[in-house]
Amino acid sequence: MESVSSQKVLVVEGKEDVGFFISLFNSINLTGVQIIPLDGKDKTRAGLTALRNLPGFDQVVALGIVRDADRSAANTFKSVQGALRDVGLSYPQRVGVPRGRGPRVGVFLLPGHGAAGMLEDLCLRSVADKPQFPCIDRYFRCVNEAGVTRPNQLAKAKLHVFLASQKKPGLRLGQAARAGYWPFENMVFLPLKRFLQKLYG
């Protein structure tokens, strides 16, 4: 990333998130937002520092940061607040509620509602009514009974199993979004969509 080209910027964790949010923005007709990946959740502070130093950042009026909550939404939010404070940017007092000027800053933690987890959890919730969904848990019960060690990130593993059940298997999360596998009209996406519309609309 050599420069900031928009007054509206969204910072996400990685490249797969970029594909997901491009598709989500298209679904709500939200345009003009530049999406910048950090290439890892542990690089928030360094990434924000680099972003502030890019040509064009002084024109940014709305800055969003979307992170996985991981094990604790409260701890992750405190970490993001600290990173924003350390680089001299406004830092919200509440998740999902933008604050400040020059730029106004908003933070959203996935999957939402203060729950632990990640983007994969949110996507899985959106397809929980699909006929093959119960098969995912049966698969992992079978794996467990076979004595195989449970995956460290079960949501990621479940998402891969769900994607393997599609007509075109092997897509990654962002590619699956572009292929229309995540039903963005599902209510589970509403808090995230409202946050984005509030910040950038």
Image: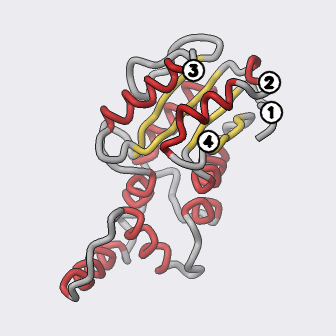
- Residue 56: image location, x then y, percent: 80, 24
Q: Amino acid at mark 3?
A: Val
Question: Any mark on residue 28, and which?
Answer: 4
Task: Answer above or below: position of 172 versus 64.
Answer: below
- Say whether disc 4 or disc 3 marks the residue closer to the N-terminus: 4
| Side of 25 relative to 159 (left or right) | right
> In the figure, residue 76 lies in which quadrant?
top left
Q: What whole-number distance in Å separates the C-alpha atoms at marks 1 and 2?
A: 6 Å
| Side of 176 relative to 51 (left or right) | left
Residues at marks 4 and 1 touching, judged by CB atoms closer than 8 Å: no
Q: What whole-number distance in Å separates the C-alpha atoms at marks 4 and 3?
A: 31 Å
| Side of 107 relative to 88 (left or right) | left
Secondary structure beneath disc 1? Answer: loop
The colour scheme of the drawn protein is secondary structure
Q: Which residue is mark 3?
A: 87
Q: What whole-number distance in Å separates the C-alpha atoms at marks 2 and 4?
A: 26 Å
Give the total of numbered labels. 4
- Say whether disc 3 or disc 1 marks the residue closer to the N-terminus: 1
Secondary structure beneath disc 3? Answer: loop
Looking at this view, is 103 or 46 the one in front? 46
- Residue 119: image location, x then y, percent: 45, 51
